[in-house]
Image: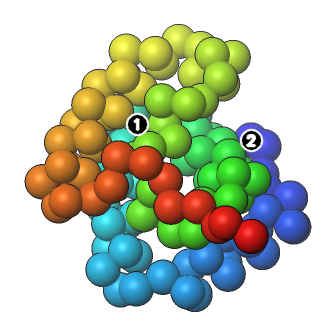
Amino acid sequence: MDILDEESKEKILNKWKDMSESDKGHFINQVALALSIWGSGPKGKQIVIDVLDMMSNNGTTTLADFGLFIERLPEDRIRGMKEKIERATLIIEGYRIKHALPSEPHRELF
């Protein structure tokens, strides 16, 4: 399983520390939904790591944007799981709408 490099880990931890309790809950709920759909085995956990890596390099300011990045995963990272990824994306999109979360990532401007 690929793991995050130290720089990415630090970015994610700093984002976590700066997030509101509400955003932390939304992040946890989206990850839990995703894992319940595509599985919590090694492949499922790797996809979560891949999404977090993408987020750490994208400039997003909150991990609550997790659901917005799932569909942006490269084909080679989701090989054999495309249907489950698409299903997770739809369900998490419904979650985001229900909780009035934005449809675009929060980004650092500077």
Is residue 36 shown left or right of residue 77? left
Q: Residue 41, can we see it?
A: no
Amino acid type at circle 2 is Met
Is any atom of residue 9 visible in this view?
Answer: yes
Residue drawn at x 46%, y 15% is: 82
| Disc 1 crowd, CA 10 A, few/some/many (<14, 14-19, 20+) | some
**Colouring scheme applied when the structure was drawn:** rainbow
Q: Measure the alpha-carbon separation of dots 2 and 1.
A: 15 Å
Residue type at tag 1: Gly
For residue 21, above or below residue 52: below
User: Which residue is nearer to you in this view: 47 or 74?
Assistant: 74
Q: Look at mark 2 in the image and give the residue it sits on.
A: 1
Image quadrant holding the N terminus, namely: top right
Residue 72 locus on image (x, y percent): 56, 30
Marks 2 & 1, CB-CB < 8 Å contact? no
Task: First in sequence, mark 2 or 1: give its number.
Answer: 2
Instruction: Give residue 39's mark.
Output: 1
